[in-house]
Amino acid sequence: MTDETPSTPRTGPRARDRVDMGLTLTTTKKGRKTLLTDSSNDSPSRLATDVADILKLSAAVDADDKENSSEENANLASVVGQAVYGFQKRAARGRGGGSPRGSAKSTRARRGRGGSGTVRASRLRASTTANDDEEEEDGDDDDAELPPGKSRRRSDGTRQSHTPASRPTATATNVGAQVEDDSEDNGEGEEEMLALELDDDFGHNGPAYERYFQDLHTTKGSKTSDNTLSKLPPLTQSECRAILSKVPVKHKGELDLLEKLHRRQFRQWFFEMSCGFNLVFYGYGSKRRLMNSLATELATDAPAVIINGFFPTLNLKQSLERVVSEVIGIGDTTGTVADLASLINGYFDSKTREVKEMYFIVHNIDGPCLRKHQAALAVLANCPNVHLLASIDHIEAPLIWDSSTTTRFNWAWHDLTTFEPYTVETSYENFASDTTEIGPRGVLHVLASLTENTKSIFRILAEYQIAESVMGDAATKMPAMAYSAYFAACRDQFLVSSELTFRSQLTEFRDHKVIQSRHAADGTESVHIPLDATTLGTILESMD
Amino acid sequence: MVDAYKPMDAFDSMTESTFILKPSLTPKQSTAKKTGVSHQPAFTNGGFVPLFQGKESVESMELRRRLFNEMWGPLEQLLVDTEQQVNQVGVSEVCNYVNSSYTRVESVEKGQLDQPFAEMSTAVAFAGVNTGDHNKLFESLQAQLTASGHHVALLESQYCTSLGSMLKCMLDQILGSLDEDQRAAGNSRLGVLAGAKTIAYDMGLLKLRWDEAAGSTSTRSNRVVVILQDFEGFAPMVVDDFVRIATSYCHSVPIVVVLGLATSYESIHQSLTKASISMLNVEKFNLQRSKECIDAAIRSVFVRATGMLSFGAEAYKSLLDQFLLYNFSITGFVKKLKFAAMDFFYAQPLSVLISMLQCSASGMLSVRDCPIRLSPEQAELIRMQRSVQRFLEQQLEETDDRNHFHLALSNDEYLQKTVLPQLLRRLVSFRAGYCLGIDFVVALQDMVPESLRKPIRTLHYYGIGQKFDDCMHWKALSAVVRRMKVPDMERLLAKLVAVAAAAAIVDWDFATKDGLDVLQLLQQSRALLSNPEELAKPESADTGEPSKRIRTRTDMENRPFLLFDNSSSDQMLSALDQCCANIETILRACLSPYQSAPLYEVFYYKHSLLLDTTFSAQPRAAVQAALGKTAYYIDCDCCKAATCDSDDPDTASEDGVDQRVMPSMHDTSIAYRLHQECGRMINLYDWHSAFSSVVEGESAKARGGSPCQRAIQARFMRAVEEMRLLGFIKSTQRKTDHVIRLTWGM
């Protein structure tokens, strides 16, 4: 086998790179060798838990599995097969997955339609040396690239695919042996490999969206593995931030140059704005810093308003009210967002205004809280003396504007790709963290599913907390309400009739981490919502 | 969470989402404010920067800025006027309808026939899909209706979400207009409810006020006009209710409704119930005139070149495509045009040359001296233009004046004073000739079948985009000319002569290559036609025999009329042939490509790509390129070096896309590339494994130690969060720790 495989030269690496993300490490032979030597030092126990690692450590497993029973190995192989399978695009074309026990065989059955992971899984039993492994793998992978019904290899594949199915009791060893057979078949000659490669290109260079439909119709249920993130150590958001702040920035020099080029355009953008265009910035990377820096430069001339559209509880009405009172100088405004927008528009259209111009910088105009206010923002932008600078990040963001809004906005689009991390923009997300608090968005979600009565119970506490934080000193950050007082207040408003029902309501809140309780030194219980007054105010408003 | 969060900078906060920066806050400005001095603008010179790496003189930069304002102001006004003029036709039709509505009702009151049902006069105005332009259109309609004494309410769907708000909106406007009427009539008793805090907005109030106003003044000819600008945007129920209520009042208050439509007349039937449609007395109007408008605009801006800036073929195509293939929006067209003008004056150092062109009242361009001295860089740039080089070489060939040639190349002063006016004169003549050529074609088109007529926007596109001999349309037209009978030809020639006589005097020596005198040629042809024997005599004398030429097959094909009328003489036919040839020569000369004009590189705007990226941007493609083809943005060595490292150079860049995932790539880019290989569902844990295997490779190479697992995890989380923010994936409840992939294909 080793003699033949050199004739199946470098069709492998590229094809494989495209196929399985789990195995991308093995891009070059050199790279893999390093890794193999690296990881072979690891302890067997880690191998058992870290499935993905096993993939890279086939050599180590070979040594390891002498100690394990063959049954265990079959299981292991099946898990590995699954794990890899989740990252195979074409494998999804196969028939439905077999039982976990037999999946090593069922993946074997599918080997004709590719998936190097499958092959590797079977190879767990192959008692070859690491070097041989490599060679064999190249051949295997090429074989694995074979799309169904594309070449004469197919008949071969179907013949073999029947074998395990007809022999459901076949052991993993048999499977492994067959793999070797196949790879021997494989090394028939260069010509064939060339043909296979062509087939491969034909099969995979089609539009990628086709895969969506393939996946949609041919698979029953999910083909991804059952691994969960619980296998990873928990990481809180603050830890995450701390770690990330130390991670070195890639391509520092190039990014600096990119920023310099962007900054050079500031004057041009200013000219465009003075000609009546509003600017919208797109492209990958956080545009916050550059836009803020532009805003500070612009602010020497006219007031600039910065709105963080990514803010999860952004209240545009409040923001506009602030603008009206602080920039225009009209206090006590009421009305909807649209009213405020037309008020500002009217002010900047009038000839007798004091403030000549205003810059309005909206980060993430496609933010969740701004999506429904586009018409109002368009009214604002329509005024020739209000200059709007906005950024969008969502790839489908332009869909939020219909044709009349687009006309009002009068956008000039600019690519502002910065490659900067979206640290601030994503800082409100709670991904995979085990924090005890849920954010304002979480509270809103919980509240949306509750009855009016229960919402009112929440409201009482929230209003109390807001009142306290306004009245009280700054020292008490989280003003809590005594349990008894809370109960009394709820009872007075006929929200609960007995303490039992009150308790159950509280338990529900507590389960959802909306409300926390603490015990004072004297034993009295007090409850509070772990959010600050401003956020609570926003939540209360959006509850209405 | 709240406590732990440390803001990144001054504009990041866990609790605040809005920050207001005021100029008075900066100390330097606050003193300026106190002394009453106006603020310094953030960027001087309106954002203009000196070109040539800052070597351009301030004078020249200021000139560019001034020229932009001087040029764009009138041009914009011209476009607005054009639009208004074109729309005027439709608007006045609707006005006439409103004026004549309810005349029947009035006659009913005089005791004639009584209608058994109430019907409300309704004008359905189809305004086209270019909703962006509708504001202007309906505002001019409103203005005209108000001018003829009607009380008009213009409603937009965004303010009329419910019947209540709709009535409020409408009554506010109409009562206001009634009040004004009364004030004008000298009635001191203003608005009954002016002092009232809350007004119950209903139609009863309108009736009351209407009767009142009718009592005080003779407003019987007035109507109450309610315009629903974007009918499709209104909730059907709201309009339905409104129609029913308004109909019941239309005996006492003459209400006319104007429904503005963007899609089709069908939409009325789709949204309103039959009952309410039956209450409307509908008349249809077509207000969609954007094509006429654009034709008029193109004629004045590009063909006549009053704006002095012309568009090259590609940029013009981009401009036209935006209009024809997108939404027929004039606003969009003007926007692009403006941006092109901005770019021209902002970035083209030779745009100062426009100041040398002067537009006289008759629309004729002439050349005058440049107000500033050209800098050496500018002079050099002029010499570098291919068209200028060609021009000078041609001059050298013709005159063999080596001294002139030498001076033009070496002496800036000479270039500016002598050569540049020559160049510009020739350019101006070329333009005048081109304009005349298009006018000829338009005149010619009047005489060809309907199917062969093209709007001027297309003619201009052919004129600048294609060579005369390649263009099918010109061929088709000349084929028609060749088949013309004598009387037709006479008419055509008369027309062309009229066009040529009316056109600005063209310096033909400059306009065309051979110094052809178009007018003279046309006159010649006419004379030839009127008296073929006279002029053709010498030739016939040569042949000696006045016999009829044999009618060849081509003859018959070209002139089918010969089949029926064989009376025309040979001389006549050859005269016709001569005329055709002359017309073709003239057209060919006039419609020569703009690339033959000197300095066309400067004066014909060509940055179509800029226009496309600025107005038809593709944010999704940009993000995908940044993540998938990072080299497009970052031309780094690290990722490239790794690519070249591969064994086979052919596999490295297959169709320009590097398939390899490099550890040196940006984190999100790695995650993005990995996710591209997944199906619909992505297991986060496996994704993480793949990610970490890539990232580990990096540090194994670089530092010999794998990065901390937690760091990888954090980086992965960040990448996933970013991808979620960008909209590539979304979380799902279907399976634990899975996300759904949302984008397919590039």
Image (cartoon, helix red, strand yellow):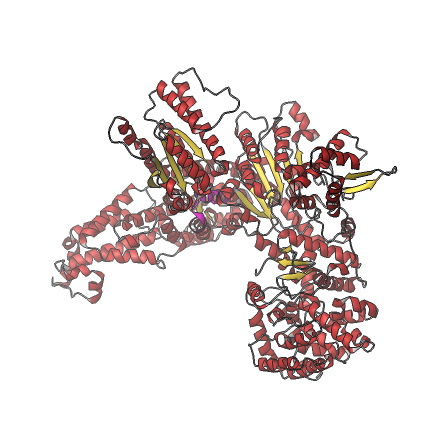
Query: Residue A1 location, x and y as percent?
Result: 70, 84
- The magenta stretch is B325-341
Q: Which secondary structure class fits the magenta region best?
A: helix
Q: Is residue B443 magenta?
A: no
Horizontally, is B571 left or right of B138 in the view? left
Depth check: give the residue in front, A53 or B89: A53
State which quadrant residue A518 falls in.
top right
Query: Residue B103 location, x and y as percent?
Result: 28, 30
Horizontally, is B453 left or right of A56 in the view? left
Which residue is found at the position 61% from the left and 69% from the top?
A: A90
Q: Is residue B329 magenta?
A: yes
* Residue B515 visible from this viewpoint: yes
State which quadrant residue B134 falls in.
top left
* Residue B360 visible from this viewpoint: no
| Quarter of the figure that contains the N terminus of chain B | top right
Q: Residue furthest front?
A: A498
Which residue is found at the position 70% from the left and 79% from the top?
A: A136
Query: Residue A118 location, x and y as percent?
Result: 68, 73
Horizontally, is B548 left or right of B499 in the view? left
**Tally of numbered discs:** 0
Depth check: give the residue in front, A230 or B345: A230
| Quarter of the figure that contains the C terminus of chain B | bottom right
Depth check: give the residue in front, B411 or B201: B201
Which residue is found at the position 64% from the left and 32% from the top?
A: A322
Relative to residue B685, is residue B614 depicted above or below? above
Query: Residue A329 location, x and y as percent?
Result: 62, 26
